[in-house]
């Protein structure tokens, strides 16, 4: 139990005689924002005073009189209109530090009742190159898995890959018509990626040519409507604002279409290929239909292509240090789909609607289509089969879907159908996230408007990090690093920078991708934390003290200055950071805790001499805090999927 939870439990006993429901009141006991108000502050007297018709200060005094915290806190103080300020006893802090020193878990006890949790994340389409859009799901999902496991839950990470969709029709069509056999034999993954990109580009070009006249006409009509409105007319302001948004959105679509058209029409080879394959998107869809229909030749090509496509994904996951317990794609569930529809029909959940089979919900006007009018199954059917499998075979208590916020409606319909479908009980949650944006405030793209490849992003991060590592290695007194060391550290810093830059934002928020901020060695970045960890390791090398021997002893911690106390109090609350992450699956709660810890350590190190402390006992005390800080950084960053190095 965290220190905060311990305090709340003590308050529970004091509040129970005063209120029927104490839960909201306990939530009002929080860490203080300002140290002059103590370490924790309880604001529960104010709302309670309205219920009981008493003054807040009198109620605060009554609560304090009932409160038993003498072993934990100094005498509580009542401030202002009825705030209760609490300062933790120094001896309690020291005792807790002694209990957790040397513990990489920093005193976090495993949960008493572990849950079986399936975390569905990353889930790219196999035949497409991974791009920056896959980054958020991959790193957020991995951090959640690591934190759940650390807390003691039974976790199954599942990469629900798209290995049965239209992209395979594109690759099959491309292979039959455009393949370079020598290139395929030399590097099948690169050749398949080229074929997918080619067919997709030609499909987009032909669609853009068809759509552009309509978009231009739509733009002209919108501009006419905009011109007809008096900008001084306040009543029409909302209409004008909406029109301008539509004009801008249509203009973006026109620019996108024009870019796609220009990319082909300025390339003679692409122009010739498009002319020879004028209906390429439909032809690719037909190849997909043949694959799904059991066509032997397409099935053989699918079997041939899939291993290479999976290896391309796994190569990126290895670089990101992300592992999965399961990689069960859409194809795995294909044999189960007919049974899902039959079961939904038998339970009168699914009905015929305009030739399709749908599930309707009173909470949403949109139908949940589980079988199209042509007999084809949908992503919805596959997702239902997946839940059924995870419930019956994996015995899941909870399933987390770490997926873009734009899929929210789909998951609302999925979860509603699942709740009504009589297959058992499982808690499902959509762990949604925002978009990675460019400096222009639009989704992050290359200059040509294409998605930024994830492997290219990693390469660039490592290259930029290498320059930083080399520059730092030139500083006076910097440790000597071999070329191999620099490469290893550059990878740690580069990949860590990408992950931390994503994870330190609230997952619901969009964020702007910024190389300089991402790899900065100051501020709220992975590099700042990583270098702080290496500096602490360097302190121990300089003083010649073995960390394990130090923490195995019985030396007490001394809190002689405020900075020591502030650091120690923060470090003994690592369990609160873990609880905060798992309360709503937000890794930024951990990054905030780590950044606060780093700031407190910086203040401590500036105010407190460690290497030349006034006494040997004080030096050992401060080294214990240094060791605990290093463990906090190493463990905390590891839970985010970020590595550290003892020498940088």
Image (cartoon, grey):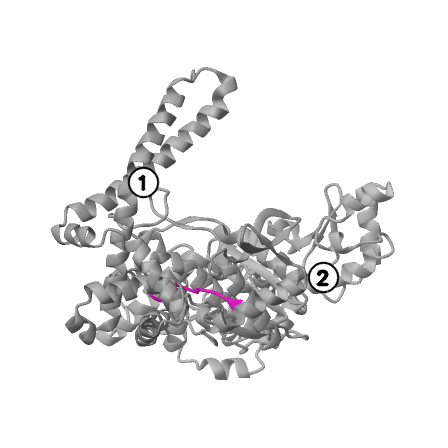
Quarter where residue 518 is shown: bottom left
Residue 7 numbered mark, or none: 2
Instruction: Name the residue carrying label 1.
Output: 211
Relative to residue 99, is residue 592 depicted above or below? above
The mark that comes first in sequence, 1 or 2, is: 2
Question: Is residue 126 among what the camera can see?
Answer: yes
Q: Position of residue 2 (x, y in %)?
A: 65, 66
For this rendering, which residue is in front, 55 or 49? 49
Q: Between residues 512 and 302, which one lies in front from this camera angle? A: 302
Image coordinates of residue 492 in percent, x first then y, are 34, 69
Q: Residues within 10 Å of mark 1 (few under 14, many from 20)?
A: some
Does residue 341 appear to the left or right of 499 in the view shown?
A: right
What is the tally of numbered marks visible in this picture?
A: 2
Indicate which disc residue 438 carries: none
Helix, strand or loop for the magenta stretch, by majority:
loop
Q: Is residue 86 magenta?
A: no
Whether residue 462 is visible to the viewer of this picture, yes or no, is no
Q: Is disc 2 placed on a helix, strand or loop? A: helix
Q: Quadrant of the N terminus?
A: bottom right
Q: Quadrant of the C terminus?
A: bottom left
Marks 1 and 2, Cα distance to the nearest angstrom?
A: 63 Å
Taking the spot 36% from the left edge, 44% from the top edge, the residue there is: 442
Mark 2 surroundings: few (<14), some (14-19) or many (≥20) residues within 10 A: many
- SS of the residue at dot 1? helix
Image coordinates of residue 72 in percent, x first then y, are 72, 65
As drawn, is 49 to the left or to the right of 388? right
Front of the two marks 1 and 2: 1
Q: Does residue 308 lie above or below 16 as drawn? A: below
Numbered range of the magenta stretch: 119-129
Q: Position of residue 153 (x, y in %)?
A: 60, 74
């Amino acid at each position: 139990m965290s220190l905060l939870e311990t305090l709340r439990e003590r308050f529970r006993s004091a509040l129970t005689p005063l209120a029927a429901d104490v839960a909201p009141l306990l939530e009002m006991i929080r860490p203080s924002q300002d140290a002059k108000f103590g370490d924790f502050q309880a604001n529960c007297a104010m709302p309670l005073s309205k219920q009981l018709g008493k003054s807040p200060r009198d109620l605060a005094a009554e609560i304090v009189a009932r409160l038993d915290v003498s072993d934990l806190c100094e005498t509580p103080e009542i401030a202002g209109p009825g705030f209760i300020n609490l300062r933790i006893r120094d001896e309690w802090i020291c005792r807790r530090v002694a209990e957790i020193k040397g513990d990489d878990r920093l005193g976090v006890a495993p949960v008493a009742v572990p849950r079986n949790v399936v975390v569905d994340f990353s889930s790219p389409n196999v035949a497409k190159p991974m791009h920056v859009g896959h980054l958020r799901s991959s790193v957020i999902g991995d951090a959640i898995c690591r934190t759940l496991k650390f807390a003691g839950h039974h976790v199954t990470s599942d990469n629900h890959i798209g290995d049965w969709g239209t992209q395979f029709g594109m690759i099959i069509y491309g292979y039959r018509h455009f393949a370079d056999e020598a290139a395929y034999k030399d590097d099948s993954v690169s050749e398949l990626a080229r074929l997918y990109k080619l067919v997709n580009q030609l499909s987009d070009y032909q669609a853009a040519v068809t759509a552009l006249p309509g978009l231009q006409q739509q733009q002209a009509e919108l501009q006419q409507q905009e011109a007809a409105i008096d900008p001084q007319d306040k009543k029409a302001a909302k209409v004008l604002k909406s029109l301008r948004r539509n004009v801008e959105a249509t203009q973006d679509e026109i620019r996108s279409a024009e870019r796609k058209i220009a990319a082909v029409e300025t390339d003679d080879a692409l122009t010739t290929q498009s002319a020879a394959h004028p209906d390429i998107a439909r032809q690719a869809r037909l190849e997909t239909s043949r694959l799904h229909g059991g066509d032997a030749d397409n099935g053989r090509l699918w079997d041939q292509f899939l291993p290479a496509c999976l290896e391309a994904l796994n190569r990126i996951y290895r670089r990101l240090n992300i592992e999965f317990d399961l990689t069960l794609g859409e194809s795995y569930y294909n044999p189960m789909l007919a049974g899902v529809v039959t079961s939904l029909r038998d339970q009168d959940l699914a009905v015929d609607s305009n030739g399709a089979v749908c599930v309707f919900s009173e909470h949403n006007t949109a139908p949940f289509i589980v079988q199209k009018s042509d007999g084809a199954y949908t992503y919805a059917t596959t997702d239902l089969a997946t839940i059924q499998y995870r419930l019956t075979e994996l015995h899941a208590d909870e399933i987390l879907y770490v997926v873009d916020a734009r899929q929210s409606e789909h998951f609302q319909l999925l979860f509603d159908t699942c709740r009504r479908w009589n297959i058992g009980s499982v808690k499902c949650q959509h762990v949604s996230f925002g978009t990675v944006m460019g400096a222009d405030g639009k989704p992050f793209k290359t200059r040509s408007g294409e998605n930024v490849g994830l492997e290219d992003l990693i390469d660039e991060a490592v290259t930029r990090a290498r320059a930083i590592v080399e520059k730092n290695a030139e500083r006076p007194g910097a440790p000597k690093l071999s070329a191999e060391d620099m490469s290893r550290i550059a990878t740690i810093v580069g990949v860590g920078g990408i992950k931390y830059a994503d994870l330190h934002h609230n997952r619901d928020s969009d964020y702007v991708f910024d190389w300089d901020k991402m790899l900065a060695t100051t501020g709220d970045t992975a590099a700042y934390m990583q270098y702080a960890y290496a500096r602490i390791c360097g302190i121990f090398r300089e003083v010649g003290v073995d960390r394990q021997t130090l923490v195995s002893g019985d030396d007490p911690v001394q809190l002689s200055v405020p900075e020591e106390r502030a650091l120690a109090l923060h470090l003994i609350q690592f369990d609160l950071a873990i609880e905060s992450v798992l309360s709503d699956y937000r890794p930024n709660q951990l990054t905030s805790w780590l950044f606060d810890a780093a700031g407190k350590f910086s203040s401590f190190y500036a105010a407190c001499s460690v290497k030349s402390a006034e006494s040997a006992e004080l030096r050992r005390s401060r080294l214990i805090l240094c060791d605990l800080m290093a463990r906090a950084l190493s463990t905390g960053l590891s839970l985010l999927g970020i590595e550290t190095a003892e020498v940088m």
